Image: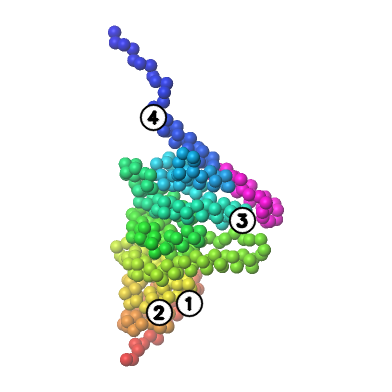
Amino acid sequence: PPPPPPPPSSSPSPTDILETHRQDLTARLDRIKTLLYEERSSSSAAYAARGNCTNYNWIPPVATSTFQSFVSSSSSTTTHLLSDLVQNLPLLPFEARKSSAAIFNYLLVCGMDGSDARQFAGVSTAFGGYVLDRAEILLGSLVRGHDGRGGPLLSSSSSTAAAGSVDITLLCGSMLRSCLRHVEIYRWILADSQCQRLVYPFLEVFVHDPNFDVSSDALETVRVMLTGSAPALPPPEGGNELLSAEEEQYRRNVESIASEFLARKYYEVIDERINQCLSSESNYMTRRMTLQLLSTILLNRSNYNVMIRYISSSQNLVTILCLLRDPSPHITLDAFQVFKIFVANPAKPPEVIKILFDNKVKLVKYLEGLHKEREKSDEQFRDEKGLVIGTLEELELEER
């Protein structure tokens, strides 16, 4: 008779061991995330019970120990746990990815959001400094994560398997925007030496992704990059006057960084990339959100020189006139918000005046019917449209 089959091995296979470790990592990261949120909830309740007064003698133990543990290297390696998690995000189980991103975001913004944020400001500042010190690795990994390539520790075979994962892209986008809320990190990303690697890929590739979620997320990142927009800072103790001064200083800083960047890189950003996003070759959502971004940029007082340069171009006017006749009512409304700036400019160049004058009869007739139904509910739109029409009707060519 044949020999009996060998008894099953009591030792787990390498695959079983790996799966056990993956489950353990997922559970531990989820537990850390939960503890961080529970600590914040308790802190907010205690802050309210004290009459919205900060306890400067209290240091958040969970947030502090998490930061110290995640950024400390062991005696046997020079790598840091959180840095490794971010760089190898595609290798992690789905829930572990989400927890890693949540912890990363929390450590960056816990000192910026919420009424009791000043209790956590030390953790946010310290972690922001850590990210800035390792910006080449961490921020590079977050941008590469948008096309599925992952970080430098990711093997080529694993990269292929993970490529195109939408959830990785969205998590990387959220982490990058959290980084942008720190002024010094924001300044570092918009430095001339980093544009080609960290900024331009969003305008050249990611905003054109056929996946709606990916392109929308990329456009939101571009909006933050080019406008410096961020949620309000937490209220300090000392009244609204102090709040206004601190908020205003923060906003001045980020708006200054954004406006200086746009002034330096006007041709590369506006002419070469944003105008390309407005072309008929781009998808509907890319054109619409880019138009909204352009309007925000041009109407920001800190971008006055950028606005003048943009509305002095006859080619830019032609682009906006084409969008003003787009089949989509949403795009025509957004295009009007930019077109009105051309018309309102008191120092129009001759070539811009000529285009408007040559087309003013058609433009007036078209604008009179543009979003007619909106005029009853939107007084500002009605008044602005009337002003634009009136200005066009009075427009005359300058005598030479």
Query: Who is closer to the viewer here, 202 or 83?
Result: 83
Q: Which residue is mark 1?
A: 383
Residues tagged 1 and 4 counted as in contact (Cβ below 8 A): no
- Identify the image quadrant of the C terminus: bottom left
Q: Is residue 253 above or below residue 87?
A: below
**Residue 118 circle label:** 3
Residues tagged 2 and 1 counted as in contact (Cβ below 8 A): no
Q: Which residue: 39% across, 29% down?
A: 14
Extreme residue in the top direction:
1
Extreme residue in the front direction:
75
Q: Is residue 119 above or below residue 316?
A: above
Q: Which residue is mark 4?
A: 14
Marks 1 and 4, the one that precedes in the sequence: 4
Q: Residues within 10 Å of mark 4 (few under 14, many from 20)?
A: few
Separation of marks 4 and 3 at Cα, in angstroms: 47 Å
Amino acid under label 3? Arg
Range covered by the magenta-colored residues = 33-62
Separation of marks 1 and 4 at Cα, in angstroms: 71 Å
Percent position of residue 317, x then y: 34, 75
